[in-house]
Amino acid sequence: MQPGTYTVDVYISNMADQVLAEARQVILVDSSVEFTKISYEDGNVTLTAQAKYICGDPEYQFWYKDSEGWKCPGDFDYNTRNTVSFEATAGQTYEVVVYAKDQNAARHWKQAAVACGSIAALEDNPKEPTAFIPGEPLDQNEMRITFMGTSVVPRRGQQCNSVFVETGNGDSFIFDMGSGVSANYVAMGIPYSRMDKVFLTHLHGDHMSDLTTLYCFGPSLDRKTPLRLFGPSGDTADDGTMAFAEALKQLTKWHVESFCFTSTGLKNGKSGYDIEVKELPYMEVGGIAYNENGVKITHFPAVHDRDGSISYKLEWNGLSMVFSGDTKPNYFMTNQAKGVDVLVHEMVVPPEVWAAKNSGLKPGDPGWQQAINYTTAVQDSSHTTQKAFGYILSQTNPRLGVATHFQVNDDTVGPAMKDIRTWYQGPVTLAKDLLVINVSKDNIRQRYAEVSDYAWYPAPKLYPPDQLAPPKYPSPLDQLNNELLEQVIPASAYE
């Protein structure tokens, strides 16, 4: 049978062909419904659904659950309207359900397709006064966590992975530096001088690629001191962070030399193009990565793809956060993250969703099995499922759980929250880029940042001229040969 809805009529008659009883049933064959939009704005939640393989004009019925129980916005009857709204209270999470049925079907949920979802009524409009504005001072007793990248798939709305953590004593730390995140650091007004300590969880490209930008351009602007790089060891010296740093310097040698017509360091011998590496034994549990100015950062093993991945725990002023990096669910995490204030943990969409969205294929298409085999293998070797994330939260009970590495779409959030709620009913956020979380001992505040899409570099840290080392090359033309210079059009020709 082809996908769709089928009406089946059954009659019971006697020998005289008199109808004694009859019944009608609508059968669903691969029929479905999904939320195409779940949003909160101006005090209202808006739900939009779309039915598939339901004949004629589908009829919909929406429900939501608040603290008082289940409610149906509008009337309780099915109708062809596929969008509804209801008033919502900021800060509350709502479970939502939609039913879709054929017009010929009985008005009963058993003859309808169903989809479930969830939405946290956060003020997610950057034009609202609750938006975070870059440059906002941080209270001396607070910690601030900003998500600069939150996806494995490079997306305009979600770059790859990076989290920026600030503490009220003026310190700042980067956890991973994945591809595309540099633009978000600029938009958030973070100068390179504050991006001098980077903690890598592992060496996959979506977690370290923009380290190239940070390393290359920091010294020509305001990071005149060495880049401090922390990261895991490997099973061999070639697999570890130390070897990676040396390879990065070789990779960028041409760039580094090209910028040495300006000062890139200080007279005390420190250079922005130096990398100070602390390689962390990847199997060590609770090892000290950093312990300065009242901030302690420890590390413990992650289980991801191959040997040589770690997770981090930051503690300061009675506050704590854990950043998992990429990992399968593991007991290292449930032990080390127990009772933290904020647990930032990776989570991935199911393999069938990943396969469908990345390939455009669907079950039965040529190539579908190959696509699903690949995404299943990636999940099985490397990542945490939605239910597993809920389980991890139930075992650690943080004040706030945050999922990252997850593609936030209208049709992925609901199923993810449903799976998480199988295990955990506490506060959960699915992070998108520019989520800002302020953490104090008595409050956790979540906002999204209001930024310009066309920001320039922020105001730099200015060193007194007498502290700056002289440039290696006195003139910006010193590295160009005479034959090239002879072909330069003089300014007098066009000025």
Image (cartoon, rainbow, N blue to C red):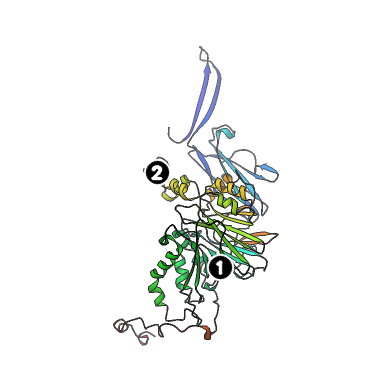
The answer to whether residue 373 is above or below residue 287 is above
The x, y position of residue 313, in whole percent, is 58, 59
Q: Amino acid at mark 2?
A: Trp
Among the 4 quarters of the image, the one containing residue 24: top right
Q: Amino acid at mark 1?
A: Met
Residue drawn at point x = 49 percent, y = 78 percent:
270
Whether residue 87 sits left or right of residue 190 in the image: it is: right
> How many numbered callouts?
2
Q: Which residue is mark 2?
A: 368
Residue sitting at the far bottom: 492
The C terminus: image quadrant = bottom left
Residue drawn at point x = 60 percent, y = 64 percent:
296
Whether residue 264 sits left or right of residue 317 in the image: it is: left
Distance, label 2 to label 1, CA atoms, is 41 Å
Residue in front for this viewpoint, 274 or 352: 274
Q: Is residue 305 visible?
A: yes
The N terminus: image quadrant = top left
Which is more N-terminal, label 1 or label 2?
Answer: 1
Query: Badge 2, how many Cα within 10 Å: few under 14, some, many 20+?
Result: some
The x, y position of residue 343, in whole percent, is 60, 55
The answer to whether residue 434 is above or below residue 457 is above
Residue in front for this viewpoint, 335 or 213: 335
Report the disc number at residue 188. Answer: 1
